[in-house]
Image (cartoon, rainbow, N blue to C red):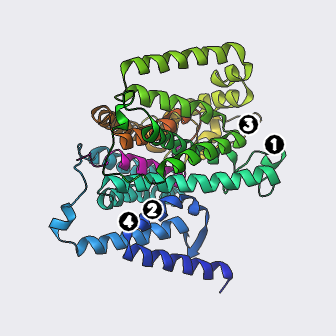
Amino acid sequence: MSLFYFLLIIAVAAYGLLAWQNLRLALGVLIALLPTYLIRFSILSIPFTLLEAFLILALLSWILHTVHRDETKRRQAGGVLESPLPLTPMALILLAATIGIFVADDALGALGVWKAYFVEPVLIFVILRSVFKKREDSEFGFQALCVSGILLSLFASIQYFTGAGIPTPWDIELRVTSVFDYPNALGLYLGPIVAAAAVLFVRDGGRKRDFKITTPDPSLKRRGGSALYLATILLGGTAIVLAETEAAYFAIPGALVLTLLFSSAKKQLKIGVLTASIVLLAILIAVVPIAREKLFLQDYSGEVRLSLWSETMEMLQSRQLLGAGLNGFPEALEPFHDPTYFELFQYPHNIVLNIWSELGLLGILAVLWLGVILFKTLRTRNEDPLVLAASAALLVMVIHGLVDVPYFKNDLATMTWIFIGMMYVPKKK
């Protein structure tokens, strides 16, 4: 037995024991270790990731605990859900993903995407909403993500100062990647976490007369919470800059401004922040050529995306209803692609085109339906800092997704459903 499999067995066994003894803590560990999808292995020629192994053990533990738990204990919680879970759009998204398996030319590859990007993340959503029944449980989930973000950011900082561990060709530009294969993977991962941490840090340090969301919540124990959120903001923000994930420079502040506008903060504060944001954006466009080029897609990266979107739309003309199927975009695009200009990408790098290509029109409608439900939840619970934090994270993904792929990746898909689950945190007593 190799050392790799020996350590793997120890890690899986330790997690299984933890999941049986303390499922809440085990879920926190799983959330903090989302990048362990990068650790891959096979059992009987079936590919697995370490993250999948953790999820399977958490699922088994959850099932066994649920079977042995009486109805009275099952209904005990630290609060009451104000909104029903979005089960219908969730089911439609899973249906669209299942159809996508049969649409794609590579059914085996599509099956792997279906499992890793849809079934497993939705399972984590279900387990979290069952186990995280108190408000402090949801805060614990946010803090687990912050720990993950801090560790990745620290490793990224070490990369920057030593130059070690940065994959080619990013080592030439000194763009950090942390444990990932490319810089934007780091920015896509850290952006939502930094935004959520910013909201929770404001909650802990804001003034009550300005922010109703800072109303004391006795159900939450915040010992050390503010320091953790501040460290996440500083280290995560620095790592995003070192990775040069430029879309996140706009996505994070944009999401925070929108979250403030949707919150219960005072009208004067909203007007002031919105005015300042518009003025600052106008100054950036007028004075900073690089910012103008990035915003209006006038640089090389923007030109590549515009060309990619044009080719994608041309491809979708003959696949309007079902798209290209799961994992089917590169092969479907090839007849419409000019290889002399740029390489063939895995996804269209636009949130709408990504979903349309992978899930078809049914997927588009289901995601829009889910978005409307989540927006209504935000509007009805706009004083709740945990709901606002989850909303800010999801908004970062949407804004960043205008020019990138914020979902179709093991860790990002799972993180998305974790934040959706946090939208349904029990209300304050």
- Mark 2 and mark 4: Cα distance apart in space: 6 Å
Mark whose residue sits in front, 1 or 4 = 4
- Secondary structure beneath dot 2 equals helix
Task: Tell me the residue at 29%/45% (across/down).
Answer: 86
Circles 2 and 4: CB atoms closer than 8 Å: yes
Circles 3 and 1: CB atoms closer than 8 Å: no
Circles 1 and 4: CB atoms closer than 8 Å: no
- N-term mark: 1 or 2: 2
- Mark 3 and mark 4: Cα distance apart in space: 46 Å
In the picture, the disc for residue 28 is 2
Task: Give left or right: position of 78 versus 319.
Answer: left
Vertical relation: 289 (above or below) 1: above
The amino acid sitting under disc 1 is: Glu
In the picture, the disc for residue 150 is none
- Residue carrying label 1: 173
In the picture, the disc for residue 24 is 4
- Secondary structure beneath dot 1 equals helix
The amino acid sitting under disc 4 is: Arg
- Mark 2 and mark 3: Cα distance apart in space: 41 Å
Q: Which residues are magenta?
A: 406-429
Label 1 Cα neighbours within 10 Å, binned few <14 / some 14-19 / many ≥20:
few
Q: Nearer the viewer, residue 254 or 308?
A: 254
The amino acid sitting under disc 2 is: Gly
Residue 408 is one of the magenta-drawn residues: yes
Vertical relation: 304 (above or below) 193: above
The amino acid sitting under disc 3 is: Phe
- Residue carrying label 3: 342
- N-term mark: 2 or 3: 2
